[in-house]
């Protein structure tokens, strides 16, 4: 068996046949980066459907479908920003105006997807269902990139606020795990350095014995 070089560059000439599409998929995975400098258009119609379908490929212990996504776009964004503004001021009446202005900019995001849970009864730890939501979110971010759009996962105090959760239809124990900001990249942002696999992966050889990867 040939050993896979984890940090090997993609071959210059993709193999013909199914291998070519596999390498194209790897190209998508290895070129995605977050971008919140967004403008219209957002994906809609069949493209948006593909992005949401990608979520359904997330690992999901016992097929619980523990995901709930709430899309916010068009005119509803104004009501959403009002909600965030009111929630921010309710938590802190002295909420800085500069931060409120930042919320206004969020209102220009073409498409926002609230990432939340739809928890089901399960004998397994509840956080497994939240992990499945996170995996679904990652699939959506990759699908967004694969289709030529851009996005970023953000959180912040409003994403943890039960008043915001309730207004978007998430009632305890369900909650929001973040928001995906999605649209067309206004500009390419400078790429930041990525760690190499040897920085975060080791081979296990036995208790308390690991080996660094080449
Ligand atoms: C759960 C979660 C919450 C995040 N919240 C924020 C946030 O509120 N603001 C922010 O600038 N980045 C946030 N990030 C990080 C960005 O989504 C993004 O990963 C980061 O800017 C690095 O860019 P990259 O995805 O190209 O590596 C969050 C990431 C995760 C996974």
Image (tube, rainbow, N blue to C red):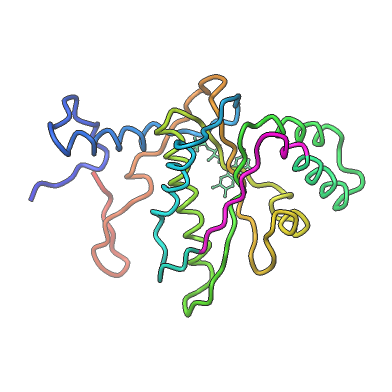
Quarter assignment of residue 101: top right
Quarter assignment of residue 14: top left
Q: Where is residue 48 in the image (x, y as percent from the top left)?
A: 49, 39
Of all residues shown, which one is farthest toward the right? 93
Q: In this view, does 91 lie to the left or right of 156?
A: right
Q: Position of residue 72 (x, y in %)?
A: 65, 42
Q: Nearer the viewer, residue 118 or 178?
A: 118
Q: Which of 60 and 26 is in front in this view?
A: 60
Residue at horizontal 76 percent and vertical 33 percent from the top: 102
Residue at horizontal 65 percent and vertical 61 percent from the top: 175
Q: Nearer the viewer, residue 190 or 155?
A: 155
Of all residues shown, which one is farthest toward the bottom? 123
Placement of 88 over or under 208, stated as above or below? above
Q: Where is residue 177 in the image (x, y as percent from the top left)?
A: 60, 54
Task: Report how many numbered discs are placed on residues in the image.
Answer: 0
The stretch drawn in magenta includes residue 127? no
Of all residues shown, which one is farthest toward the top? 187
Ligand 1 position by quadrant? top right
Q: In this view, does 3 lie to the left or right of 63?
A: left
Q: Is residue 73 left or right of residue 131?
A: right
Residue at horizontal 81 percent and vertical 41 percent from the top: 82
Placement of 167 over or under 75, stated as above or below? below
Q: Where is residue 142 in the image (x, y as percent from the top left)?
A: 42, 40
Q: Give the range drawn in magenta.
A: 66-78
On-image quarter of the C terminus:
top left
Residue at horizontal 28 percent and vertical 50 percent from the top: 212
Of all residues shown, which one is farthest toward the front? 45
The stretch drawn in magenta includes residue 70? yes
Quarter assignment of residue 208: bottom left
């Amino acid at each position: 068996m040939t050993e896979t070089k984890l940090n090997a560059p993609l071959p210059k000439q993709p193999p013909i046949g199914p291998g070519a599409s596999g390498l194209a998929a790897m190209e998508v995975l290895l070129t995605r980066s977050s971008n919140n400098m967004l403008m219209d258009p957002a994906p809609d119609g069949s493209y948006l459907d593909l992005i949401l379908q990608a979520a359904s490929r997330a690992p999901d212990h016992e097929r619980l479908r523990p995901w709930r996504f709430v899309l916010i776009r068009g005119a509803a964004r104004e009501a959403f920003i009002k909600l965030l503004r009111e929630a921010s001021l309710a938590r802190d009446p002295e909420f800085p105006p500069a931060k409120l202005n930042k919320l206004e900019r969020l209102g220009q995001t073409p498409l926002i997807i609230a990432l939340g849970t739809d928890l089901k009864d399960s004998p397994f730890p509840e956080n497994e269902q939240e992990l499945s939501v996170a995996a679904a979110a990652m699939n959506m971010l990759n699908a967004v990139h694969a289709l030529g759009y851009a996005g970023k996962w953000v959180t912040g105090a409003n994403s943890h606020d039960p008043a915001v959760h309730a207004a978007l239809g998430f009632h305890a124990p369900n909650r929001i795990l973040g928001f995906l900001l999605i649209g067309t990249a206004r500009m390419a942002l400078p790429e930041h350095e990525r760690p190499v696999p040897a920085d975060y992966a080791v081979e296990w050889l036995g208790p308390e014995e690991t080996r660094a990867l080449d």
